[in-house]
Amino acid sequence: MSEAKKLHVALFPWLAFGHIIPFFELSTPLINLVSLPLPTVEHLPRNAEATTDIPSHKTPYLKLAFDGLQGPLLQFLQTSTPDWIIYDFAPYWLPSILANLGISGVFYSMYGAWTLSFFGSSSSAMINGEDPRTGPEDFTVPPEWIPFPSKIAFRLHEAKQAFRNHFEVNDSGFSDVFRLGSVMGGCDVIAIRNCNELESNFSRLVGELHSKPVLPTGLLPPADFDGSRDQDDVWLTIKECLDKQNKGSVVYIAFGSESELSQPELHELALGLELSGLPFFWALRKRDNSVKLPDGFEERVKGRGIVWTSWVPQLRIMGHESVGGFLTHCGYASIIEALYFELPLIMLPISLDQGLIARIFGEKKVGIEVTKDEDGSFRREWVAESLRFVMVEKEGKPYRDGAKEMKKLIADKDVHDRYVDHFIEFMQNHRVA
Ligand SMILES: *[C@@H]1O[C@H](CO)[C@@H](O)[C@H](O)[C@H]1NC(C)=O
Ligand SMILES: *[C@@H]1O[C@H](CO)[C@@H](O)[C@H](O)[C@H]1NC(C)=O
């Protein structure tokens, strides 16, 4: 028997860091970057290459430009003939190209299995408009096709926002749900950043809803790094500030590179931090100067609170012993990172499926959600209460313990490596020719 032919896999992530990074992590170092030129699109700033370069209302134009990669990608696939291509939710046009070329496709979901389950089956609910749920209210209860006990549902304000942004046809020509439904309907395998130890009921349901194999890739926990060797100036400055605080006392706040707080949200959040009396480190990415902190805020919290407006080494901050909790917008990737460092969560979901993620991790008792009004707004008192509950109060201890417990699973490298190995083995055994 001849030696097994090397497996050749192409990866095609959506242009957002929360997607690109896990795709990179899955690829191991065996990677070859191929550049496909992004076409110019009206309304899209010339240098924009990822969602982080643009305000969120311009995202549909980035999707439009992304759709323009169809020709160059086809050319690449024809000449390079990979065994498999692993792709993201956006290229609704890719499955039919792959069918013609005889290349197998994996849809690699950056959404959790709970979110995919919540959206329903690709053929009826997502693409043909046959979802029995027709208005935002219908999304505030768990869908009828979930056969096990679950509280997964949007709050009304989240459902309204999701309807506006993801269900309705956008300037990119297609709704996100249509894109997602198309790639799920057309792929051979659905891969999810998940492991059965975290949850398996939703993963199994995704397989049933779509009649496809579902492969968890493990959680892809952050790679170990040697902090002692790091001499980067930014980190040294931050470390000096954190070193001055007591162990486990500092709240780390970050809303990801893509989420945007409105001015009233930013205002209440800042005043809530101030009211909590807790030390904090706030990584506040400001892509423009349209949002402002309350007058005199930084002066008043001097010595205990820091607002950092440029890039930060997030993993190093989370790993610092002074940091004891994470106030988050509930991006799935940053939650995995925080729990890897056993930080309990104070959850303030902003958009997309973050509300669903907050429900799931709330049920797992590794954090709590900041109370919100029916319209989605929140008050400084509620922010301060949640922060103190999770960080210092006696009643919050189960959540601090819950995060410690979850760390054991997320940091178990063997568990997660096994999923990746199994995933690769599957691709080896199921390639065409
Ligand atoms: C399209 O979606 C974006 C979010 O991705 C939203 O901000 C925008 O208002 C939507 N545009 C239209 C025309 O619906
Ligand atoms: C998974 O589903 C089964 C029933 O199908 C249920 O008994 C079990 O409690 C569920 N597990 C979780 C963690 O919800």
Image: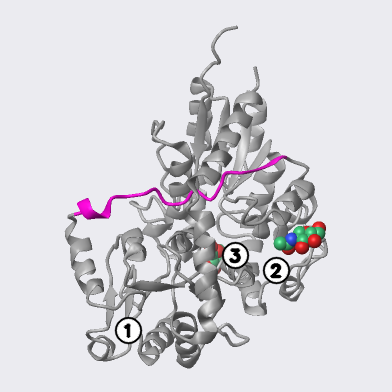
Does residue 427 sit above or below 347 in this rendering?
above
**CB at disc 1 and ligand 1 closer than 8 Å:** no
Report the colour scheme.
one colour
Residue hosting label 1: 293
Numbered badge on residue 152: 2
Stretch in magenta: 213-230
Decide whether the magenta segment is chiefly helix, strand or loop: loop
Mark 2 → mark 3, Cα distance in angstroms: 11 Å
Kindly state the secondary structure of the residue where label 3 is placed.
loop
Label 2 or label 1, whichever comes before in sequence order: 2
Give amino acid for label 2: Ile
Label 2 or label 3, whichever comes before in sequence order: 2
Which x, y percent locates residue 187? 67, 38
- Judge from the rendering whether residue 365 lies leftward or rightward of residue 251; answer left or right: right
Which x, y percent locates residue 322? 32, 72
**Mark 3 and mark 1 residues within 8 Å of each other at the beta carbon:** no
- Image point (62%, 27%), residue name: 103
Residue 7 appears anywhere in the view: yes
Hey, which quadrant is residue 309 in on the image?
Answer: bottom left
Residue 218 in magenta stretch? yes
Residue hosting label 3: 353
